[in-house]
Amino acid sequence: MNPPNATIHRRRWAILAVVSLAVFVTVLDGTIVNVALPKLSLELGASTRQLQWIVDAYLLVFTGLLLAAGGLGDRYGRKRALVLGLVVFGATSALAGIVDSANALIAARALMGVGGALIFREYPDLWSIAGMVVIAIGGLLTLSDRRAATPLPPDPSRG
C-alpha cells in the first residue's frame, strides 16, 4: 500500500492542471465580460450604470468573500471548497447565459463571485500566473477581433 504522499506525488501534475484551469476560469471571467459589453448593451438594453454593475458585481463579491472562503477551506478542506466553488460557479455561469435582463445578469454575476472566491482562495499563488496568461490572451483576442473594439452605443437613459 502506498503512503498518501507517494500518491499525491504521482498525481501532482494532474492536480496542478485541474487547479490551474479552475483559477484560470475565475480570472478569465473577471475580464472577458468587458469584451462583451457592447453586445450586452444592445441585446439586454442595459444602461451605462447597469453595464458597470455587470462588471463590478462579480468582482465585488469575489474579492469581498476571499477571506471567508479561505476559512471555509480551512474548516472543511480545500478539495471540498474547490468542488463547491466549481459547482456554484458553473451553475451560476449557466444561469448568467440564459437570463434576459440586465438586472438578472447582475444578480447572476454576483452569485458567480461566490463560486469564484471559493475556487480562488484555496490557491492564491496561481493568481499571478493565471492573471498574466489571461491578460496576454485577452490582448491578442482584442487585436484579432476589431469588432471587440467598437464603442458602446449611446445610453438611451441619458436622453
Image (cartoon, helix red, strand yellow):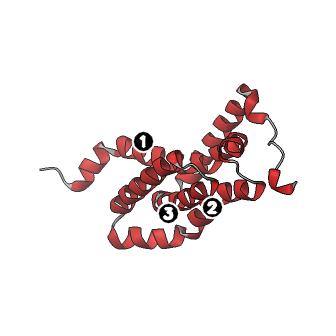
Q: Position of residue 135 (x, y in %)?
A: 67, 42
Q: Amino acid at mark 2?
A: Ala
Q: Residue at x 76, y 28 (%)?
A: 146
The alpha-carbon separation of the residues under discs 3 and 1 comes to: 22 Å
The alpha-carbon separation of the residues under discs 2 and 3 comes to: 11 Å
Q: Earlier in the sequence, mark 2 or mark 3?
A: 2
Q: Quadrant of residue 107?
A: bottom right
Residue with the most extreme front position: 159
Q: Is residue 140 above or below residue 54?
A: above
Q: Earlier in the sequence, mark 2 or mark 1?
A: 1
Is label 3 in a helix, a strand or a loop?
A: helix
Q: Position of residue 116 (x, y in %)?
A: 51, 57
Q: Amino acid at mark 1?
A: Ala
Is label 2 in a helix, a strand or a loop?
A: helix
Mark 3 or 1, closer to the camera? 3
Mark 2 or 3, closer to the camera? 2
Residue with the most extreme right position: 159
Mark 2 or 1, closer to the camera? 2
Most foreground residue, 118 or 74: 118
Most foreground residue, 126 or 10: 126
Most foreground residue, 141 or 39: 39
Residue 114 disc label: 3
User: In the picture provided, is 35 more to the left or to the right than 25?
Assistant: right
Q: Amino acid at mark 3?
A: Val
Q: Residue at x 33, y 70 (%)?
A: 76
Residue 17 disc label: 1
Q: Position of residue 127 (x, y in %)?
A: 57, 53
Residue with the most extreme left position: 1
Mark 2 — residue? 57
Q: Residues within 10 Å of mark 1 (few under 14, many from 20)?
A: few
